[in-house]
Image (cartoon, rainbow, N blue to C red):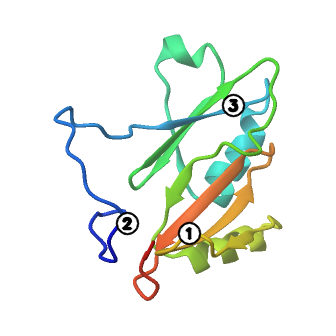
């Protein structure tokens, strides 16, 4: 790998597959009956808005939330176990403001400076699912 930043990710090369890949949403599992608790976190704490699910999918429970360029689907899983390692990597424009918001709601944040070219932190939703939040750091470009 070269010392130059070559992609919009801040490291590594761009790659055009010719298929137009993109990410529409991330799905996280939630416990049966936990929709209101998840609304409190994802809407109340993070500030996302709930999206009405199509009726055929609404019958399954869960909820969908979105803001800006992010959409998360929270799907009911009968034998729910929180994702403690697997996680979405969510890009934000003001990581410090997000950290302050989380901490103001009593949510612990864990800072991690081991991703060159980015500032990042981890937090857990109210069901224990791990979330990673990142902000590109132009003052510390990726060099690996």
Report the residue marked by disc 1: 115
Report the residue marked by disc 3: 29
- The x, y position of residue 111, in whole percent, is 70, 73
Q: Please, is residue 47 above or below residue 27 in the view? A: below
Q: Nearer the viewer, mark 3 or mark 2?
A: 2
Report the residue marked by disc 2: 11
- The x, y position of residue 118, in whole percent, is 50, 73
For the residue pair 120 and 33, the one nearer the viewer reads as 120
- Classify 10 Å Cα crowding around label 2: few (below 14), some (14-19), many (20 and above): some
Q: Decide which of tag 2 and tag 1 comes sooner along the chain.
A: 2
In 3D space, how far apart are the residues under numbered discs 2 and 1 (Cα atoms)?
Answer: 10 Å
Q: Please, is residue 90 above or below residue 114 in the view? A: above
SS for callout 3: strand
- The x, y position of residue 88, in whole percent, is 57, 47
- The x, y position of residue 96, in whole percent, is 60, 80
What residue is shown at x 78% (from left), y 67% (from top)? Answer: 105
What residue is shown at x 62% (from left), y 51% (from top)? Answer: 43
């Amino acid at each position: 790998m070269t010392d130059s930043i070559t992609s919009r990710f801040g490291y590594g090369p761009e790659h055009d597959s010719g298929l137009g890949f993109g990410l529409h949403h991330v799905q996280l599992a939630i416990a049966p009956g936990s929709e209101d608790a998840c609304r409190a976190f994802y809407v109340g704490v993070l500030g996302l808005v709930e999206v009405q699910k199509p009726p055929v999918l609404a019958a399954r429970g869960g909820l969908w939330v979105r803001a800006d360029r992010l959409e998360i689907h929270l799907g009911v899983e009968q034998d729910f176990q929180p994702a403690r390692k697997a996680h979405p990597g969510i890009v934000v424009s003001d990581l410090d403001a997000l950290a302050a918001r989380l901490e103001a709601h009593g949510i612990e944040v864990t800072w991690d400076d081991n991703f060159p070219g980015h500032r990042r932190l981890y937090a857990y939703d109210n069901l224990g699912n791990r979330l990673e939040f990142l902000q590109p750091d132009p003052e510390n470009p990726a060099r690996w």
